[in-house]
Amino acid sequence: MVDTAVARSEELVVLVDERGAAIGAAAKDSVHHETTPLHLGFSCYVFDADGRVLMTRRALGKRTWPGVWTNSFCGHPAPDEPIGDAVHRRARQELGLTIERVVCALPNYRYRAVAADGTVENELCPVFCAVAVGAFDPSPDEVMDYTWVSWSELRSAAGLPWAISPWAAEQILLLETAGVVAG
């Protein structure tokens, strides 16, 4: 059995410059603070066969935005890991889910957000859309609750700044504007 605390402390994130070029790596646990360096992440919106999107509520033990509703899952590619591989890996790790038809819908999305405790998220964060294959089993270390919603329900939540994570609120509008999903 893997000690999740040890596994997390050994997880590395890719540090990037303003152009998005990799400039190094750092331990994930060391980069999320009041002066978080720009690093590479990703977000993914998972749809089911009926076109509903999976929204998750972050576990209370998460370092950033604990207990907040957000997109299906997020993550960070490891150094030298293709970002598409990282998306599939995190779908399995966070949700126990296999995904297909993975598309990078917003390749240049970037955001900076400050949590109530002063922790800063500062990411170049491509946004993916994917389709769920089969059942899933969310990890309680990652997800405390989840729901499948129609895009119109999700779009309504995006207009309420306290309802979902700041990155999801922005991404939902951008996905719609880009024509990835119907409004």
Image (tube, rainbow, N blue to C red):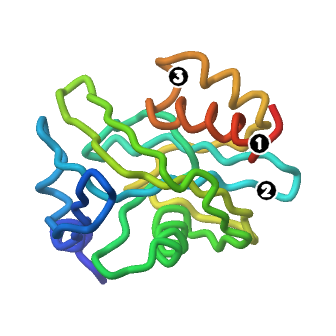
Q: Is residue 20 left or right of residue 165?
A: left
Q: Amino acid at mark 1?
A: Gly
SS class of the residue under badge 1?
A: loop
The quadrant in which the N terminus is found is bottom left
Task: Give the mark nearest the N terminus, 1 or 2.
Answer: 2
- Find residue 39 and report its image quarter: bottom left
Q: Which residue, as the protein is rendered here, is positioned at the far front?
A: 19
Which residue was labeled with disc 1?
179
Q: CA distance from mark 3 to mark 1?
A: 23 Å
Which residue was labeled with disc 3?
163
Which residue was labeled with disc 2?
48
Categorize mark 3 by other alpha carbons within 10 Å: few (<14), some (14-19), many (20+): some
Q: Residue at x 56, y 38 (%)?
A: 171
Q: Residue at x 32, y 55 (%)?
A: 19
Q: Amino acid at mark 2?
A: Asp
Q: Amino acid at mark 3?
A: Ala
Foreground mark, 1 or 2, reads 1
Q: CA distance from mark 2 to mark 3?
A: 22 Å
SS class of the residue under badge 2?
A: loop
Q: Is residue 165 left or right of residue 80?
A: right
Task: Give the mark nearest the N terminus, 3 or 1.
Answer: 3
Q: Which mark identifies residue 56?
A: none
Categorize mark 2 by other alpha carbons within 10 Å: few (<14), some (14-19), many (20+): some
Q: Is residue 139 left or right of residue 174?
A: left
In the image, residue 72 above or below residue 91: above
The image position of residue 44, as x and y in percent, is 57, 55
60 vs 131, nearest the viewer: 131
Q: CA distance from mark 1 to mark 2?
A: 18 Å
SS class of the residue under badge 3?
A: loop
- Find residue 113 and report its image quarter: top left
